[in-house]
Image (cartoon, grey):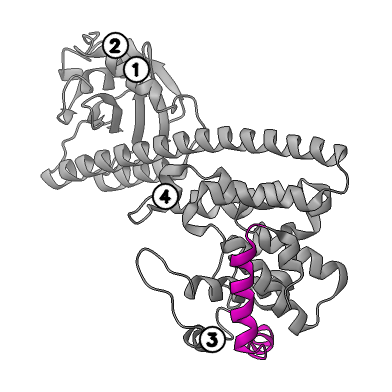
């Protein structure tokens, strides 16, 4: 017997489409949910199904080969009519299914129990169900487990949908970044020697995006140059450290405002999007020929000496020297700058904190070089950069 359609079928189908789940490859989380359902209920078959207009498609299947069935023969087409679990102890004894080809022919279904997957808007997207070839019943505990698994499946569908939306936004932003990069490449060909202008434009774009950190890139660049000289860096490597440190956060251009400026704690998915700014910055900086040697700082500026940073979890000397120098300079500027949630620390306190983190967050050799710089030099660097404004030439001339 073919089931009637849900009263909200048009809206339900629109909701199913919004998840972009149909005809996608298997995913471990949904396979695991089906496997758990089969194990708890003691059945040979367990499925996570999505109810399309004319078919029932299986996102996950345990003990089942068919990838979809016509909706007109689907047990789950009856399940999605309500918000409660549907149990068919013996399909041959149920007039709705006694002549169903899935019962009278292979796979010879006799027992079925399914719980609808209902989203926050009240739409039944599909089901999580268990099937057996012998009549049987579920215990009360098994029914509860099936309900819990259905709730979990809906939660993962929502997370997947949110991730899909974020990915779409990220792709749109990446295209914007690619367009900006092409514009920068055209500008480079027209004015071959205007490197300073290009750097200033990129830094200004980031400062305009995030007013809270305006001036941060210039100060960190000046500190990096001073520390690099104390370490013994010279020539082209010094220039690459200057450029890389100045553009270290340029990847934040590709982070949505809703995440970049979110006042509350980020979710796990949002944290991953935020952390992607290192890779976005690397791709952007690396795509500009004269900046490509400095791209490693954009990629690795969030790594820690003890290996607990991101995006690659590099440790020790695996981290490029420029990024190890940057870590100290960045922390120095962060601690000695006012923030909405705290006042700036004195320079002496910041130096002591960096010293304590030697060997954990920071390279001990870089820390020793940093501590060899007189305090008055560091104070002079900060004052000089803030007085001169957004000018890389002023950074280059710091003592």
Which range is magenta? 362-390
Can residue 75 be seen here? The reply is no
How many callouts does the rendering have?
4
Of callouts 3 and 4, the N-terminal one: 4
Instruction: Tell me: residue 231, above or below residue 8.
Output: below
Viewer-closest of 254 and 167: 254
Nearer the camera: disc 3 or disc 1: 3
Residue at 27% across, 18% down: 77
Q: Quadrant of residue 254?
A: top right
Residue under label 4: 261
Q: CA distance from mark 4 to mark 1?
A: 32 Å
Viewer-closest of 16 and 171: 171
How dense is the environment of label 4, judged by Cα within 10 Å: few (below 14), some, or many (20 and up)?
Answer: few
Residue under label 1: 14
Residue at 40% across, 28% down: 19
Q: Secondary structure at mark 4?
A: loop
Can residue 177 be seen here? The reply is yes
List the single residue furthest toward the front.
387
Q: Which label sits on residue 351?
A: 3
Q: CA distance from mark 3 to mark 4?
A: 29 Å
Residue under label 2: 10
Of callouts 2 and 3, the N-terminal one: 2
Q: Quadrant of residue 99?
A: top left
How dense is the environment of label 1, judged by Cα within 10 Å: few (below 14), some, or many (20 and up)?
Answer: few
The magenta stretch spans residue 189: no
Q: Secondary structure at mark 1?
A: helix
Q: CA distance from mark 2 to mark 3?
A: 64 Å
Quick check: 123 left or right of 64?
A: left
Of callouts 4 and 1, the N-terminal one: 1
Q: CA distance from mark 4 to mark 2?
A: 37 Å
Q: Position of residue 383 (x, y in %)?
A: 59, 73
The answer to whether mark 4 and mark 2 are in CB contact below 8 A is no
């Amino acid at each position: 017997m073919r089931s009637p359609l849900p009263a909200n079928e048009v809206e339900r189908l629109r909701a199913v489409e919004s998840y972009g789940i149909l005809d996608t490859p298997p995913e471990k989380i949904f396979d695991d949910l089906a496997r758990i359902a089969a194990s708890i209920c003691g059945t040979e078959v367990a499925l996570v199904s999505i109810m399309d207009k004319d078919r029932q498609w299986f996102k996950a299947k345990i003990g089942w080969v068919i990838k979809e069935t016509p909706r007109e023969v689907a047990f789950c087409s009856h399940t999605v009519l309500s918000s409660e679990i549907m149990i068919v102890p013996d399909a041959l004894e149920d007039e709705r299914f006694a002549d169903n080809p899935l019962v009278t022919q292979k796979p010879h279904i006799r027992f079925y129990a399914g719980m609808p997957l209902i989203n926050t808007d009240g739409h039944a997207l599909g089901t999580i169900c268990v099937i057996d070839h012998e009549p049987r019943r579920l215990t009360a505990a098994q029914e509860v487990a099936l309900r819990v698994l259905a709730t979990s499946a809906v939660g993962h569908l929502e997370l997947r949908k949110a991730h899909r939306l974020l990915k779409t936004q990220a792709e749109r932003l990446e295209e914007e970044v690619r367009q900006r990069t092409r514009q920068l490449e055209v500008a480079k060909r027209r004015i071959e020697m205007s490197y300073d202008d290009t750097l200033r434009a990129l830094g200004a774009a980031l400062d305009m995006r995030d007013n809270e950190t305006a001036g941060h890139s210039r100060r960190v660049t000046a500190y990096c140059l001073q520390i690099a000289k104390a370490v013994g860096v010279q020539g082209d490597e010094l220039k690459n450290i200057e450029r890389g440190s100045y553009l270290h956060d340029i990847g934040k251009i590709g982070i949505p405002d809703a995440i970049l400026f979110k006042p509350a704690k980020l979710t796990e998915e949002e944290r991953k999007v935020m952390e992607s700014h290192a890779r976005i910055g690397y791709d952007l900086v690396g795509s500009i020929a004269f900046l490509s040697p400095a791209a490693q700082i954009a990629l690795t500026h969030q790594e820690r000496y003890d290996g607990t940073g991101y995006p690659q979890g590099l440790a020790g000397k695996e981290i490029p020297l420029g990024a190890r120098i940057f870590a100290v300079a960045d922390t120095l500027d962060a601690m000695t700058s006012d923030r909405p949630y705290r006042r700036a620390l004195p320079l002496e306190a910041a130096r002591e904190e960096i010293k304590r983190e030697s060997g954990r967050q920071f390279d001990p050799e870089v820390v020793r070089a940093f501590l060899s710089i007189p305090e008055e030099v560091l104070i002079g660097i900060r004052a000089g950069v803030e007085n001169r404004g957004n000018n890389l030439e002023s950074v280059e001339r710091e003592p």
